[in-house]
Image (cartoon, rainbow, N blue to C red):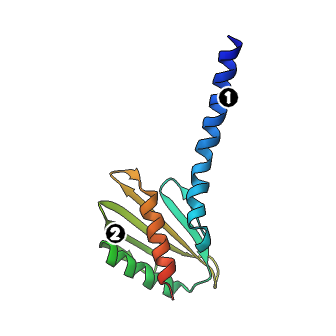
C-alpha cells in the first residue's frame, strides 16, 4: 500500500514537471530572436526594430503565407488564414524605441504554436 502511494506521488510529480517545461522548450527555439511562448497558441517578443518596419514585414509575411482577412495599421492588428489555420499578428508600441510582436495561431480551435513560431521567425528575419 505504501509503495503504491509513493509511486503515484512520484508519477504526479514527474507529470507536473514535464508539462511545465513545454513552453520553455518551444521558447528556446526562438530565443535567439528574442521571442518566447506566452501561451499555448502565442509567441511574443519585444524588439527595438521600428514599428513601420515590423508592420511592413508582418504584412508581407501574412500575404505570402496565406490570405489576408483583416488589417488595421493604427491598432497594429493583422488577421490571416494560413494553412487551414487562423493567424493573428499584433504589434504594440511599448516605448518610442520598443515594439512588441505577438503572433497567435489556431487550427480548428486548437493551438497551433509551431505555425505561430514559424511566422514570428519569418517576420523577425524580414524586418528592416
Disc 2 crowd rating (10 Å Cα; few below 14, some 14-19, many 20+) is many
Q: Where is mark 1, residue-wise?
A: 10
Residue 121 seen from this side: yes
Tell me where residue 23 sits by quadrant: bottom right
124 with respect to 95 (left or right): left
- Tags 1 and 2 touching, CB below 8 Å: no
Asked whether 93 or 50 is in front, the reply is 50
Circle 1 residues within 10 Å: few <14, some 14–19, many ≥20: few
Instruction: Give the labeled residue for mark 2.
Output: 80
In-front residue for pair 42/24: 24
Q: Work out how far the residue at label 1 is from the one at label 2, CA to CA, in angstroms.
A: 44 Å
Whether residue 87 sits left or right of residue 103 in the image: it is left
- Report the side of 124 relative to 68 (left or right): right
Q: Quadrant of the N terminus?
A: top right
Callout 1: helix, strand or loop?
helix
- The residue that appears at 36% across and 75% down in the rendered structure is 62
Q: Nearer the viewer, residue 118 or 96?
A: 118
Q: Nearer the viewer, residue 74 or 20?
A: 20
Element on which disc 2 rests: strand
In the image, is residue 48 above or below residue 38?
A: below
Amino acid at each position: 500500500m505504501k509503495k503504491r502511494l509513493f509511486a503515484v506521488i512520484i508519477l504526479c510529480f514527474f507529470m507536473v514537471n514535464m508539462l511545465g517545461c513545454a513552453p520553455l522548450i518551444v521558447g528556446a527555439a526562438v530565443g535567439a530572436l528574442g521571442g518566447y511562448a506566452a501561451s499555448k497558441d502565442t509567441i511574443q517578443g519585444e524588439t527595438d526594430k521600428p514599428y513601420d518596419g515590423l508592420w511592413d514585414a508582418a504584412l508581407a509575411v501574412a500575404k505570402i503565407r496565406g490570405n489576408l482577412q483583416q488589417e488595421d495599421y493604427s491598432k497594429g492588428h493583422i488577421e490571416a488564414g494560413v494553412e487551414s489555420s487562423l493567424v493573428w499578428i499584433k504589434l504594440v508600441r511599448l516605448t518610442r524605441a520598443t515594439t512588441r510582436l505577438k503572433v497567435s495561431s489556431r487550427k480548428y480551435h486548437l493551438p497551433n504554436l509551431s505555425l505561430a513560431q514559424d511566422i514570428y521567425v519569418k517576420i523577425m528575419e524580414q524586418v528592416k
